[in-house]
Image: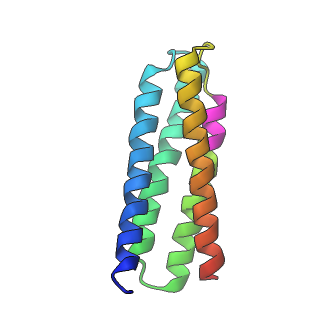
Amino acid sequence: MSEEKPHKQYDLEDRTFAFAQAVRAFVRQLPQTLSNAEDVKQLVRAFGSVGANYIEANEALSKKDFVMRIKISRKEAKESGFFLRLVFTADNKELESSRAALAQESTELTSIFGAILSKSE
């Protein structure tokens, strides 16, 4: 049973990494507008922090530290969803489809981190 936990952690680490890569690919395709430049900066900070804080949670020195890092991951996943909704896609159907999938992933990650918190507190 102890072998399952690292596997699950590794899967979520992979999932948050894949999310970060997908968002990076998405933002490279966005129209270069002044508002996108600012929103993308915020989005890049948020989505990168999701996985980074999850990795830190897995290396936490205490339960309190673990809980704090999971809360940060959840917060950053929510923030990613917010900035995904804000960016301008010029009504490009392909970009809109990508945005919808990424927003769904940010919602799912938020829920996953919420469930981890519920079990941890």
Quarter-of-image position of residue 42: top right
Q: Residue at x 59, y 81 (%)?
A: 120
15 within the magenta span: no
Q: Main secondary structure of the magenta part?
A: helix
Write the residue at 58% across / 64% down.
113
Lateral position of residue 39 relative to residue 29, left or right: right
Residue at 61% across / 22% down in the picture? 35
Looking at the image, which is closer to me, 72 or 25?
25
Where residue 30 appears, x then y in whole percent? 50, 20
Q: What range of the chain is rendered magenta?
A: 81-86
Q: Position of residue 37 (x, y in %)?
A: 52, 24
Above or below, 2 against 79 in this view is below
Question: Looking at the image, which residue is at 63% across and 59% down?
Answer: 111
The C terminus, quarter of image: bottom right
Q: Against 5, is 95 above or below?
A: above
Q: Is residue 121 above or below residue 79?
A: below
In the rendered image, residue 16, in percent from the top left (x then y), is placed at 44, 53
